[in-house]
Image (tube, rainbow, N blue to C red):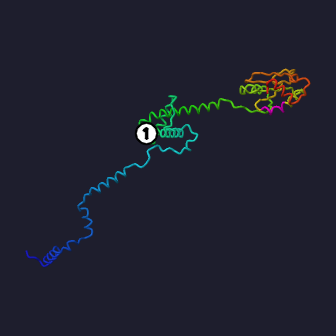
Amino acid sequence: MASTPAQEEFDHIASKNSSNPVSSQRCHPADKVDYHHDRKVEEPDEETRYLQQMIEHNMRIRTYDRRPCLPHKDFDKGRTTGVKGVIADARSYEEARQNGSLGTPRNRCRTADKRESICSFLNEAGDGSDSDDGDFFETWREQRLMELQKMGKQVKNRRTTPSVRRYGFFDEVDALGYLDAIEKVTPDTVVVVFVYDPDCPSSKLISDTLVQIVPSYPAVHFVRVNYAEIEFDNAGVPAILAYKGQGELFANLTYVIDHIPEGAPFNTHTLQNVLSSNKII
């Protein structure tokens, strides 16, 4: 088959391009991208592999502290129960474990709830302690128990031991107040009861004198009661009755006027001497 002029021209151009090395390097930019991944991948050398391993190793190292992260000490001031109590006990345990400052155990008794709460807190926080911590915890919790028992005993003593009452007043009472005054006090409190007759001048004289004496003896409870309130014999008034030991009568000065020394002037000093001689004040 004979070649046409067009075919001959195309063959000439193709032959010319294949023989020119510069033209063979010419290609469309998109073709370079398509064939980029077909290039041969070079294997990393030994030094490159070592550096990559070091980088991967360092990236896997944990930089955070796995020990329990406890709140500041101000958080658990004055707290012995609840979440703050558990945190306070956990803090005490951690400090004692790190410092090794534990005393000799004296008591083997301890509630299981306290131990479980502390263990649970430490485990959740990532304590990471070894098997020796079990024995250490036993010693620590026993010392902690003794501290709590001591604190509880002090609180109990404060609640059950009556405080020293200060008086210094001359209280007016009725029949029930009279009984309360001599019974509802500490055993060593002295209670002085002045029994008077409001219509008797001698009763008024003794009462006015006692008003001046009372402030000087604030530890003694002075009260006064109308003789009719307690059905006291009118012939014995004015009278001074002294009690101690929550209702025990130890001084009975009926008709006080008879107890004043003969010839002595009646005044505050004289009445004080009468009370003192009977160990009332």
Choose top left, top right, bottom left or bottom right for residue 257: top right
Q: Is 65 placed above or below 186 here?
A: below
Which corner quadrant holds the N terminus?
Answer: bottom left
Where is residue 144? Give x, y as percent: 53, 34
Choose top left, top right, bottom left or bottom right for residue 212: top right
Q: Residue furthest right?
A: 263
Q: Is 32 placed above or below 150 here?
A: below
Residue at 55% from the left image edge and 42% from the top image edge: 76
Magenta segment, principal secondary structure?
A: helix
Residue at 17% from the left image edge and 75% from the top image edge: 20
Q: Residue furthest left?
A: 1
First to last magenta residue range: 210-217
Asked if the magenta segment contains residue 277, the reply would be no
In the shown orientation, is residue 35 left or right of residue 169? left
Where is residue 106? Give x, y as percent: 52, 29
Q: Where is mark 1, residue-wise?
A: 129
How many marks are shown on the rendered structure? 1
Which corner quadrant holds the C terminus?
Answer: top right
- Of 228 and 241, the residue lying toward us: 241
Asked if the magenta segment contains residue 213, the reply would be yes
Label 1: few (<14), some (14–19) or many (≥20) C-alpha neighbours in 10 Å: few
Where is residue 3? Give x, y as percent: 10, 76
Report helix, strand or loop for mark 1: loop
In the shown orientation, is residue 224 left or right of residue 143? right
Q: Is 46 placed above or below 149 here?
A: below
Tag 1: amino acid: Ser
Where is residue 65? Give x, y as percent: 44, 46
